[in-house]
Amino acid sequence: MLQEVFYWIFNMSITAAITGVLIMLVRLIKRIPRRLTTFLWIIPFLRMIIPLGLDSRYSLMSLLSKITTKTIVVYQPTDKISFSVMNSVMAANSYFPITYKVNILENIFSVASVIWVVVALAIILMLTVIYFTTLHEIKDSKHLIENVYLSEKVTSAAVYGILSPKIVLPSSYKDKDIGLILQHEKAHIRGLDNLWRMVAFLVVAVHWFNPFSWLFLKAFLADLELSCDERVLVKLGADRSKEYASALLECKQGVTVFASAFGGARIRTRIENILSFRKLTWISLTAFIALISVIFYVLLTNAG
């Protein structure tokens, strides 16, 4: 049973890697706002967790299945094949672009599946400890206003928690103008960014063996911060982009896992994105949405 689960996870990881690499290429198009490209990361993450989907002759997987699917025949001393393994292979054929029909790999998959689940559980346990340790560190923070708190144990403003998120600022920010900082953190809360961060980490924990998954996680978290900056500027107006960039430069960068920090991601990249911000016109917004819809259809559907 565990071997069959890992077989599906392994193949799902392959298709997710293919779609994720294409998303990385789309990100190179600077004209596409990060608040739109962030949605594209739904595709590889869904590919990592959902083994089923709609079939389409126009799917990227249809093209790949024609040029990559190979049947490898290995000598087998008996004509009998385990029904459970064969059943998994037959079911997977309709979804996966690359099919493993090599019975000699059964033992390899059996051992690999045990290693996979042990490491995945260890990573999830580590993430759980980090999450609750982080919350414990800020439990003595002092209330300032609304859901905003001050703490001597943090170095950068950030949102902590998911169900009842609170904004925690360094104690040194007490006498600063925190208006723009709060705008940023409230945008994180409205966007449920901490929830998406946790989901992304858990998905990658399951696909820890795939180096691309860690690359995608890093890119997704960076896009999440850039997207948050853009959402703030949509509300503030492009004319305040320099003021917002200056507020970002004055903040220290914080290293967080489950907290959305104002000083997160690469400062230089964020500053460049902020200063180049322009509000979308209805024409450009429609064009971008159409492009992203096509990308979703091509990359998220399966071989028909």
Image (cartoon, grey):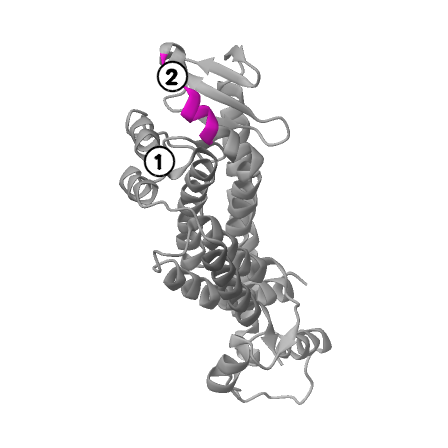
Nearer to me, 258 or 226: 226
* Secondary structure mostly seen in the magenta stretch: helix
Instruction: Work out whether residue 18 can be spotted.
Output: yes
* Most foreground residue, 272 or 72: 272
Three-letter code for the amino acid on which mark 2 is drawn: Asp
Quarter of the N terminus within the rendering:
bottom right
In the shown orientation, is residue 249 left or right of residue 153?
left
- Picture disc at residue 239: 1
Dot 2 lies on which element? loop
Q: Residue at x 46, y 85 (%)?
A: 67
Q: How many marks?
A: 2
| 73 up-or-down from 54: above or below | below
Judged by depth in the image, the label closer to the viewer, 1 or 2, is: 1
User: CA separation, marks 1 and 2?
Assistant: 19 Å
Q: Which residue is mark 2?
A: 177
User: Is residue 35 a member of the stretch shown in magenta?
Assistant: no
Q: Mark 1 or mark 2, which has the lower sequence index?
A: 2
What is the span of residues highlighted in magenta in the rendered image?
Answer: 176-184
